[in-house]
Amino acid sequence: MMFAAAALALLAALALALVRAIAGPTVFDRALAGNSVGTLAMLMLAVIGFLTGRPDFLDLAILYGLLNIVGTVAVLKFFRYGDLGDPGGDPLR
Amino acid sequence: MRTAVDLLSWALLLSGGAFCVIGALGLVRLREFYSRTHAASVIDSAGATLMLAGLMLQAGWSLPALKLAIIVLLIFFSTPTATHALAGAALVRGVPLEPEEEVASRH
């Protein structure tokens, strides 16, 4: 019962974060909203695991969190340098 | 005893959900990018930590509780790093420090 209420709150928060991801004027707004969606998805996986009585879903939540941080930094690096393989040093050298 | 733990965990779950919705509302309603990073970190710090603490009380002393603690630590260290990198990249890239409509009305 309480798990369902928490899941509903998380769904509402996910919908609002998606609104910002679609509307965000800059790419940084979209990356920020994507980061929030990643955190909310981790919480959603944990809550759904307890809601259905299968806490094994927590492994998926851990994996999703690890992928989320790598994904955010990769997107940032791509929009900073235009290339994921760029070492990121002094561009004039 | 069991009822008291259940009540505490429900309170933590509900307040965590409330913080998540508040942070997401701020993410939509605030008027410039740096304020929105502030609102998004409400989701990552207060919302996630409270909700996972509530789930930990439901799990008791077991392996799921340890996994939940790992998730709390992961969120605790990774999301401030990501937010810091985002704000730094936006500042380098020249995202204005004022709301977009004020910048647009001045030009």
Image (cartoon, coloured by chain):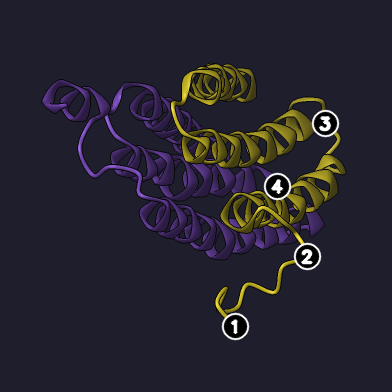
Chain colours: A yellow, B purple
Chain letter for the residue marked with disc 4 in the picture: B
Please name the residue that numbered disc 3 is placed on: A53
Q: Distance between the residues labelled 2 and 4?
A: 43 Å
Which image quadrant is residue A4 in? top right
Please name the amino acid that badge 3 sits on.
Answer: Gly
Please name the residue that numbered disc 1 is placed on: A93
For label 4, the crowd category at 10 Å Cα-Cα, with few meaning under 14, some 14 to 19 and many 20 or more, is: some
Please name the residue that numbered disc 4 is placed on: B59
Picture coordinates of residue A41, whole percent (x, y): 67, 34
Among the two numbered marks 3 and 2 on one chain, the one whose residue lies closer to the N terminus = 3
For label 2, the crowd category at 10 Å Cα-Cα, with few meaning under 14, some 14 to 19 and many 20 or more, is: few
- Tell me the number on the disc at residue A85: 2
Q: Nearer the viewer, mark 1 or mark 2?
A: 1
Residue, far front: A92
Q: Is residue B51 left or right of residue B58?
A: left
Chain letter for the residue marked with disc 1 in the picture: A
Please name the amino acid that badge 4 sits on.
Answer: Ala
Count the marks: how many?
4
Among the two numbered marks 1 and 2 on one chain, the one whose residue lies closer to the N terminus = 2
Q: What residue lies at 62% left-to-right and 58% top-to-bottom? A: A81
Which image quadrant is residue B22 in? top left
Q: What residue lies at 68% left-to-right and 33% top-to-bottom? A: A47
